[in-house]
Image: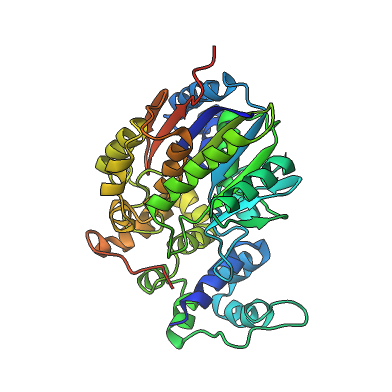
Amino acid sequence: MSTYYVDKFLYTIDRDPKWVQRYKDDPAGTIEAWEQEVGRWLNDAEETTVLSFTDAERAALAAHDYVWLFEHGAHFFLNLTLFIALYDEEYTREQGPLSFQREFGRKLSHWLGKEYPSVGL
Amino acid sequence: MAQLTAVLASTHHPFYYKATTSPLEERPPFAAEWRRKVEAYRETLTAARPDVLVMVGADHFHQFFLDNYPQFLIGRAERYDATFYNEEREFGLPKYVLDGDVELSRYLHEGLLDRDFDFSFSHELKLDHSIICPIITVRPEADLPVVPIYTNIFAPPLPSPKRFWQVGRAIREVIDAYPSDLRVAAIGTGHLSLELGGPRQFGEHGPDPEFDRNAIEWLATGNIDAILENVTHESMAGAGNATHGFMDLLLMMGIAGDGVQADYVDELDLFHTREMYMTWYPNGAPA
């Protein structure tokens, strides 16, 4: 697991409207581009060489699989906020306000009454 | 010496702004009552006639991330931008630029260091909704200088509940010692029981009404012993995965005093979470 890198992905995508749109339109392609342009970037002269995704993380991000991400310790706030950005508008239009947020909760209902996976790294 | 004229502790709800400013036909059915409660709460600050606001909140992964996350941080800037793109996108919050009070920032920071509270600091701090929500609710004119203080309620490992209380007590000592004629108000926001990105989110009520009842009672009566006996990181997680924001309310109780009853307590049961509005007047109720 490289949960830090997954959180970094969610964090840096969510804070930039261009990356939000790219990740919505082309998840797999965006992961590759992000690793080149953002994931390794520290400043124009420096880069991070020690971080990478596992195959399972890459697959979950490519599938917008927020349930898997929750279950593997992605930070709950980053996981929620980014997927709201991707899906809230169309869910609201088709099924009413907060319908995406409620579906998100329902898909995690098997965790009710259990200790959640830690978001601590 | 400076006078601490009011201490406010409340939940912050980023949906308030949109719920109460959108066209009438788009507002949720509880918007009018919500607005009445917030405006009544605002009066508790207005009556205290503050000159400067010490504001306690928590950055929600807006400026700070896991590469470098402060446990406690104070802003020392002359001005602060506020509201990030993703808060405009999700909550419709407006952007602000707030004036800082560099002199009080410096005095508070050094006073805390002198008392062994080793705060991080920032000279370029963009504020998020934990500080802008209370500006919108209790000081919508946004006309007073601020000293922002951020805590870590979000990125484990977190400081203990006891430490939040101690930080509040220390902030109070430093404000009381500040050689100035300023009237200072301290405003902090956090959460009661809250779930974000988990199975209990966005329910008809907050995830743990019993925790909420107890928490309001403990805060309103200044009962630090009951809090330290009952509230741990684990018990807060049991009440909802984002309940740790309660510790910012505890910090505010520490600023208010030791065993001090609140002067104003109100609440509102909403979907997703319960709202709480609490005020102490440490130097007597305003005339």
Question: In this view of the protein, can residue B167 be seen by the observer?
Answer: yes
Q: Where does the N terminus of chain B fall, quadrant-wise?
A: top right
Residue B112 location, x and y as percent? Answer: 58, 49
Residue placed most toward the observer, B52 or A68? B52
Q: Residue furthest top?
A: B287
Q: Position of residue B32 (x, y in %)?
A: 47, 24
Q: Position of residue A55 (x, y in %)?
A: 46, 87
Position above or below: B85 against A46? above
Residue B49 located left or right of residue B244: right
Query: Can I make out residue B205 in this image?
Result: no
In this picture, is A15 found above or below B207? below
Is residue B179 rendered to the left or right of residue B48? right
Q: How many marks?
A: 0
Q: Is residue B176 left or right of residue A92?
A: right
* Near-viewer residue (A118 or B204): A118
Q: Position of residue A37 (x, y in %)?
A: 69, 79
Q: Residue at x 42, y 55 (%)?
A: A100
- Left or right of residue A115, residue B166 in this image: right
